[in-house]
Every structure is written in structure tokens, then in C-alpha cells.
Image (cartoon, helix red, strand yellow):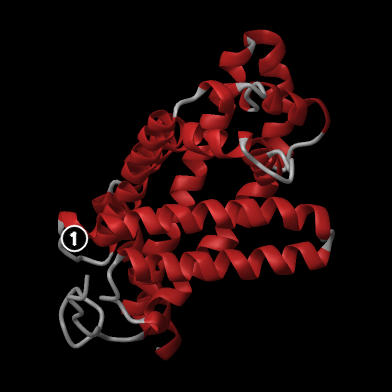
Amino acid sequence: MKRTVLEWEHRLAALTLVRRGRDLELMHRAMGFATLSLVTLAPLLIFIAAADPLGEGGFASWLVDGMGLSGRSARAVSDIINPPVRVIGTTSVWGGVLLAVFGVSFAGSVQNGYERIWGLPPGPWHRVWRQATWLAVMTAYLYQEILNGHEFHGPPRIAVSATTGALFFWWGQRFLLGGQVPWRALLPGALATMVGLGGLRYFSYLVFTPLIVDNAVSYGTVGIVLVVTSWLTGVGFVVFGGAMFGRWFWDHHHRAPQAGRPAQRQSHAS
């Protein structure tokens, strides 16, 4: 009898998780994440990569590494991502500032997703500095991932990437939410995000690596961009889905005294 009750509790908990994903419009947000990544984030990272003092390849190297690509598929993606060397010389300072503004809008969409997941009201406009700071830290995180790929291989690389990634997503939620959710409530979501990204990388290695080569032959650049967009949609699904799992895990295993919201210290610090 007790075992039956536990089984039903697990089933109901799973249904609650599915229902939350539907209420959040998880797939819609993931597709929005991919679109904003291409339109607002990628140009900024490409611009930064062109000024890379260490010549590590910047955004193209991160994209190739994140997707688990190699050989012809890696070269195909790098050819359309890496800009000519003269891009820095011909791009004005104001152009760089404009790209940064677009990047902040991407950070704002991520913040909005986290706020929806944790049932918090939108932050005031003057907290845009949080979005700008998160964007800068994210860029540094992606860059160090490139450096890790050159310094570590095999299990050490996996351990370093998993640790730095979990720390970034753990801190990122806390920072974008203005400290309104306790650290211990955010940790499961950060860990789930890294597990999801690891699974997505393996899936990409098996599926997207040959698909990019086929699409490059059949459709050219458009086919490659289509595959990259699909992968970015998967990343968005994992980022928001991991945070949503963290909220579900917290509510399911730590009954909050307030209905629908985790026990938290209400912080109004900017």
C-alpha cells in the first residue's frame, strides 16, 4: 500500500513538472532564445572574438566545441561564423556599443524567463546593470571554455567544464533574480542545466555532425544556419528547463510555507 502511494506521488509530481512546462510555454521560450541568440548575441560575440588577443577563435570555437563538431562539420560552421580580420578596423565604437545594447536585451529575456519560473514580478528598469553584468560574465565564461578545451582533455576537461558551468548557472540565476531566491533552492536547477547541456552535446555529436555536412552540400549556408538554430533551441530548452526542474525539485522536496513560492528572503536590493 505504501509503495503504491509513493508511485502515485511520483506520477503526480511528474505531471506537475509537465504542467509547469506548458504554462511557461517552454518550447516557445526556447525558440525565442535561439532567435535572440542569433540576432542579438551572436553579432556581439563575433565582434569580441575578432578582437581576441590570444587568437583562440572566440565564438566559432565555442560553438564548434559546444556542439561537439569535428572535421568537415567544424570547418563548415567556422567558415560562416568567423568574420574577416578587418572587421575590427571597419566597425565603429558606436557600432560596438549598439551590439552591446542588443546583447543586454538577450540577457533581459533570460532574466524574464527565470522570473516567470520562480513566480517573481519583473525587475525595475534601473536594474539593467544586472543584465549587462550577467552578459559580461557569460562572455568570460564562454571564453574560458575555449581555453579549457586547449588545456584539458578527457575526464579533466569534463570535470572543469561541469564545475565552471554549474557555478555560472547557479550564480546567474541568483544575480538576475536580485537575490530573491536562496542559493540552496537554485543549486538543483544549475546542476540539471549542466546535465542537460552534456546530453545535448552528445546528441549533437551523434546527429548534428553528419547533418551539417549533408545540409552544407544540399542547401549551403542556409542549411548550416538551420542546424545551428536547432541546436540553440535545444540550449534554450535546457537553460529554462533546467531552472524549471530546479523550482519543481525545491517545491517537491522542500514544502514552502507560501503557496506557489519557495521560502525565501525578500530582497529589494538593486
In x, y percent, where is residue 126?
Answer: 18, 57
- Circle 1: is it few (<14), some (14-19), or many (20+) Cα within 10 Å? some
234 lies left or right of 63? left
Kindly indicate the quadrant of the structure image that contains residue 222.
top right
- The residue under label 1 is which amino acid type? Gly
Question: 225 and 97: which one is in front?
Answer: 97
Reply above or below: 113 against 163: above
Viewer-nearest residue: 147 or 66: 147
Residue at horizontal 84%, vertical 60%? Answer: 154
Q: Height in image: 141 above or below 269?
A: above
Question: Is residue 258 visible from the viewing direction of this image?
Answer: yes
Q: Is residue 16 above or below residue 255?
A: above
| Residue hosting label 1 | 123
- The residue at the point 58 percent across, 63 percent down is 165
Quadrant containing the C terminus is bottom left
Where's the N terminus, which quadrant? bottom left
